[in-house]
Amino acid sequence: MSWLDTVVQGVLLGGLYALFAAGLSLVFGIMRLVNLAHGDLIVLAAYLILVLVTALGLNPFVAALVAMPIMFAAGWALQRLVLNRTLGDDILPPLLVTFGLSIVIQNALLEGFSADSRRIYAGGIETASLAIGPVNVGVMPLLTLASAVLAIVALNQLFYRTSLGRAFRATSDDPVTAGLMGIRPNRIFAQATGVAMVVVTIAALYLGTRANFDPATGPSRLIYAFEAVIIGGLGSLWGTLAGGIIIGVAQTVGAAVNPEWQILAGHVAFLAVLLARPRGLFPRAVD
Amino acid sequence: MISRRRFLKTAAATSVLAGTSGLAMPAIAQGKMIKLGYVSPQTGPLAAFAEADKFVIDGFNQAVKSMGLAYEVVVKDSQSNPNRAAEVAKELIVQDEVHLVMVASTPETTNPVSTTCEAEQVPCLSSVAPWQPWFIGQQGNPGDPASWKPFDYAYHFFWGLEDVIAVYTNMWGQLETNRSVAGLFPNDGDGNAWGDKAVGFPPVLDKLGYKLTDPGRYQNLTDDFSAQINAFKQANADIVTGVMIPPDFTTFWNQAKQQGFKPKIASIGKALLFPSTIETVGDAGHNLSSEVWWTPSHPFKSSLTGQSAAEVAAAFTQATGKPWTQPIGFVHALFEVAVDAMKRVGDPSDADAVAEALGKTKLDTLVGPLAWGSDQLPPFAQKNIAKTPLVGGQWRRKDGGGYDLVIVDNKTAPSIPTGGKMELIA
C-alpha cells in the first residue's frame, strides 16, 4: 500500500515537472533555443498572477487566465526584439543572452518585490484531498497533473491540426525551405515563444500555489525541466510528459528508500535513460 | 597621460579631502575617520536577512553624527554566495582599508568573511549564525575537537544549538503529548548540525524520553515529502521539528494536510523567522512555533541611541511600511559593539588593539548584555563567542488578518517576558 502511495505521489509530482518542461520543450523543439531564463520566466509569471490576485482580488485560476494573454505578448515581444537577433549558426549567443536575461529578471524582481518569500493563496484548496481507494490524493497535485495532460493535448492539437502548427513543424525541420514556401521563421518563432509563455503561466500557477517562491527560485526549477525534455526526446511533447513522470516517480521511490536519495534518484534516472537511449525515449526532431 | 585608474584615485582623494575640510567640526573625539566595512546577503536567496540593513545603517550614520563621531560605513553585498562574500571581504581590507569588518547572516556569509579577516589579520565582528557552525565550520578539521583553535581577530555573538534544543523541549514540556517527535533535517550546514547524533537533537531527546523519527537528510528545495509523511504517520508523531527553508516547509505542511497527518505541535527553525513567510502559509500558520532571538518586547535598550527594542521596531515599520524582523536587533548590535570597542582604542588602525578591545567588550545592547569570555561555553569557544538569550514563541493569527509572534517560553532567559502559554495546533 505504501508503495502504491509512493508511485501515485510520484506521478502527481511528475505532472508539475512536465508543466515546467512543456514550454521549454516547445521552444527547444522548434528553434533549438536553449532558454536558460525559463525558470525565471516561470517565477516572473507567478509574480504577475500574485499581483493580479492581490490587486484585483481575483481567484488565482481566473488571474492565471488574465495573465495568459499578457505573458503571450511578453513572450512574443521578447522573441521578436531580443532572441531572434541571437539565433544563427553559433549556439553561444542565445545561451549567453538568456543567461543574462535570467540575472536581469531575478534582480528586477528583487527590486520590485523585495526578497520576501511569497505564495499565491488559493483559499484552502491546497490542503484538500480525495481518498481514492487506499491512497489520499491531494486536489491540487491532481489538478496539476490534469493541467499538464490538457496542456500537452492542446499543444499537440495545435501542432498537428492547424496551419500554424504546420508552419511550426516546417520551420523546425528546415527553416530555409520553409522560408521559400512563404513562411517567415522570425514571425513563427515569436508566436512559438508566445505560446510557450502561456504554458509557463500555467506552470507558474501551480508552482506559486504549491510552495513559496522568491526572486531567486527560478534556476532550481530549470534543471528538472531540462531533464524531462531530454528524457522525452527532442520535439516530442508526450515524451516530455513521460520524462516529467519518470523523474517524479524516481524521486519519490528514492525518497521512500532514504530521503538522501530523493533528488539523486531523479538525476540517476535521467542518466540511465541517456545511457540506454541517447536521443531520449520518443525523439521526433532530426538534427 | 592620466589613466582611468589614476584619475579615479585622484578624484577619490580630492573628494575625501573636500569632505573632511567641509566637516570643520571642533574637537572630534578621535580626530580620525574610522572606517567600518559591512558584508551581508542583500540579494539572492538569503536576502530576507538583510532587509533591515539600510534602515539600521542610516540610523547609525545619524546617531554617530549627532554624537560628533567620525565614522564611515562601506557596505558590500555577498549576493548569498560564499565565494563572493570572501571576495568582497578582501576588497574591504585591501582597497577600502577598513579598520573593522562586520558581517551578518547565516554561516554561508559569516564564515568566508571571518576566515578572510583572520588570514589578513584584520579585526572582524560577526553575528546571526548559531555559534557551532560559525566556530567549528572554520576549523581546519571540524571532525576533531582536539585540533580546534580559537581565533585572534574574529569575534562572534549569537546563540547556539544547545539553546535551541532547550527552548524547543521546554515548549513541548508545557503540553501533554505522546512524546513521539518527527524530525525534518535537510542536508545542509544547519540540518546536519541539528540532526547530529552527538551534538544535535537526538541525544537530548533520548535523555528526556522523547522518541525521534528521523527518516534521513533530504535536499533543500524538495518538491515532495510523501516518504517522510508516511514514516511520521506510522510513528504516530505528535510533534514535528526541524530546520527547513520556507518553500520546503510550505510544501511539507500542505502535503501533510492532504495526507491526513495532523501533528499537535510544530516547532520549526529558520522557515518561521519572518512574518512574511508565516503569512504565506495562510490560515494554517496559527500556533506554529519557532525559536525567537529578538522581538520588540525584549526588555533591552540600544547603547547607541537609547531607544528600546519596541521603539526601534516601530521606527523600522514607520520607515519601510513593513513588519519588524528579528535581524534588526542584531545588525544594530553589531554597530553598537563596533562603536564601544573603538572608543576603547587609541588608534583604530592598530588591528591588534581593536581585536583585543572586541574581546574585552562588556556592553548592554539592543539584543541583551554581551560579554566575551563567558564560562557558559566550552573552553575552546570562550575567547571568541558571546551568547545572546533565546526564547520560544508561537505565531498567533490576529483578528484583522496577519500574525503576532507571542513568546510562550522563557525558562532559558527569564528576563524576557512571556505573552502567553504554549497552545496546541487546533
Image: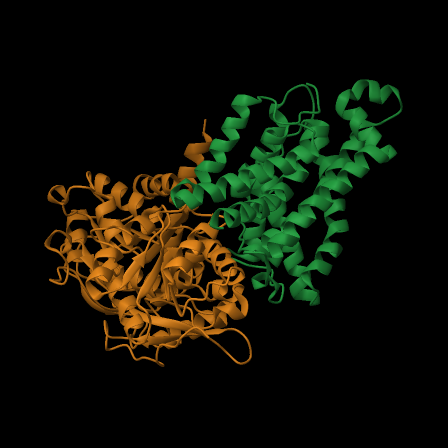
Please give the name of the residue rendered at 20% of the width and 38% of the height, measured from the top-left corner: B140
Please give left or right for residue B412 compared with residue A167 in the image.
left
**Chain in orange?**
B
Residue A34 visible, this orientation: yes
Location of residue B413 with respect to B160 vertically, above or below: below
Number of numbered callouts drawn: 0
Judging depth in this view, the residue of B364 and B276 nearest the camera is B276
Q: Quadrant of residue A32?
A: top right
* Extreme-right residue of the structure: A182
Residue B22 visible, this orientation: no
Please, which colouring scheme is shown? by chain
Judging depth in this view, the residue of A247 and B90 nearest the camera is A247
Q: Position of residue B392 (x, y in %)?
A: 32, 70
Judging depth in this view, the residue of A160 and A216 nearest the camera is A160
**Chain in green?**
A
Location of residue B75 with respect to B417 vertically, above or below: above
Location of residue B334 with respect to A195 vertically, above or below: below
Q: Position of residue B57 (x, y in %)?
A: 39, 60
Judging depth in this view, the residue of A227 and B180 nearest the camera is B180
Q: Position of residue B136 (x, y in %)?
A: 22, 47
